[in-house]
Amino acid sequence: MDNQQQLENLLTTVDNITVNLDNQRRIRLDVPPKELPALLELLKGRAGFLHLSAISCVDWIDENEFELVYHLWSYQINTLVSAHIRVPRDPGVYISVYDLFQPAAFYERDIHEMYGLYFEGSPDMEKFILTEWDGPPPMRKEFDSEAWVNDHFDWQDYRPDWLIEIEEQGGGIETRPDEQRFSQSKGK
Amino acid sequence: MRPENYEPKHHPPSTEFELNFGPNHPGIEGNYALKVRLHGDTVVEARADAGYLHRGFEKLMEQRLWIQNIALVPRICVPDPSPMEVAYSMAVEQLCGLDVPERAQWLRVMQLEMSRITAHLFYFGGHAATTGMYSPMFWGVADRDLVLDLFEELTGGRVYCIYNMPGGVRRDIPEGFLERLSKLLDYLETRLPEYDNLFFTNHVLVKRARNTGSMTQQQALEWAVTGPNLRATGLNFDVRRDDPYLVYDQLEFDIPVEQGGDALARTLVRRNEMQQSIRILRQIIQQLPDIKGPIRAPIPNPLAWNVPAGDTYVRLESSKGELSWYVVSNGGQKPYRVHVRGPSAMHAVQVLENLSKGCRVEDVAQIMFSLDACPPEVDR
């Protein structure tokens, strides 16, 4: 706990920060977006938080904000710090922390692809997973995947004409319309 | 990317050429691709190309009930699915403040360690194949099947167990299960020296893997390498011991560490981890009969379950490294946001790109397998 005491003392030197001790090895910090790079540098340099475990993005559509959560682990004091910031959804720009943590490149690229949040200074913002996707960023809350499917794809036709023809000649396996679970033509 | 949409961006001078390594290639793990630029036999640059296995789990989970997601989560990583369901269950429990009964925690550890053995058996078969040895693949997969038989008996599922649920596990062990597990462990222990002879001390492996794809400890920390790959660089760190979850703090086990950070060191760490998993399972066999009590905590009606608002970050040690889940609830019946951070998100992209640089083209596959990268974790 001595180490953690030191960490708490360190955090008191940062302005505008809310510290919550979730349990022994988890600390939640809420910081204004402006202060975050300085905070991460302080944690990395003074408390051994070398490991950027993940950057998570949450889309709070009602508040019109993106929440970014930087999870850092210190091998020195065995503690996880989650630093939360909120950035406005519009225009959706934030700064990269790639110069501090190299793994940030992957997470920032991923968030840009899935949420459309741009990171200035990140080494590569090109598409990665959704290479051939030209729709809106799919992880945003306003993106309705079911509506997208209905607009862009055809449902499988379980009773094509050629099958009806065969059935009329006494062949085929008949599936009554009310048993067609996945057909959109159900009930028509 | 479909071939018809592929436009090579760089046209390098005549001495260099571009090679598409994957997505359908025996030297690549799963549906994944590397675009490799070569100068002769030497790799100049490698770029990871993911997305062939993207199923949109994170979006799907936002559209399903908390309990429905249990059937979805193991499918994120195929070779080692059990840690996924345990991590998700632990996240929901932390959000609800549910206390998991002790017996359920022991059963979960049993499942996790069995799963670790299956993953490592699968892994060493794959690694052997990239060095031109195909027999270890048959041995590894055949012995893995014996563990899967026990999974089937315990849970009904061989690969995707879906054994956990928020609050505990689905059912207790069948009669005589521990004896059969004990017999299997005896068998696996007699197999380890045979694996050594066949693979781990084989000259083909030693000559091919030593100094291949090596990284220093400093590099490993910079690139957020975790798990066995990190321990192969000499850092003695394991989430099970240093950030304990479930009942790992009541179990005795060593943490295998190797020096050098090359493909050989990574293989040996995993080989020794199998031994430690057997040791942990033996302790469970000994202690589980004395731990009485329920196997799950009572939960509210799972079909109308409002999980309290909040967020939680769960970490655990999967066979591939640090697996973390960030789960956010807004008090509704479905998760508001789920973020899965698989260890391979780092290993298969940044680390693989960095390590492939400068190596020979025939070593790329070996580096990828020795990192035990699991592409489904990248794509999700």
Image: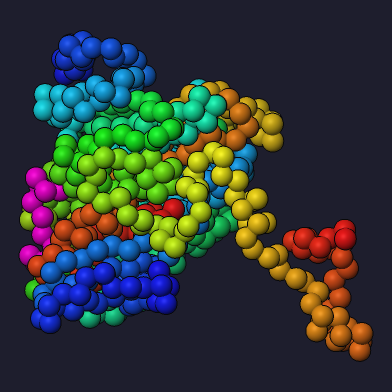
Q: Position of residue A16 (x, y in %)?
A: 28, 12
What's drawn in magenta, residue-wise?
B208-220
Is residue B372 placed above or below B103 in the rendered structure?
below
Q: Quadrant of the N terminus of chain A?
A: top left
- The residue positioned farthest toward the bottom in the image shown: A169
Which of B155/B25 is in front? B25
Q: Of residues B274 and B56, which is closer to you in this image?
A: B56
Residue B240 seen in the figure: no
Is B30 displayed left or right of B167 in the figure? left
Give whichever of B22, B237 is nearer the camera.
B22
Instruction: Identify the residue at image location x=11%, y=28%.
Output: A45
Whether B294 is among the magenta residues is: no
Give the camera-side residue of B4 and B175: B4
Of all residues, the one furthest to the front in this rendering is A91
Quadrant in the rendering for residue A164: bottom right
Q: Which residue appears at 85% of the width and 71% of the height?
A: A175
Residue sitting at x 10%, y 81%: B15
Image point (58%, 25%), residue name: B331
Q: How is the image coloured?
A: rainbow
Instruction: Give yes or no for residue B217 being in the magenta stretch.
Output: yes
- How many numbered discs sit on the rendered protein? 0
- Up the image or down, B180 lies above or below A174; here it is above
Q: Quadrant of the C terminus of chain A?
A: bottom right
Which percent across, then down, holds residue B127? 25, 69
Question: At which x and y percent is residue A25?
Answer: 29, 24
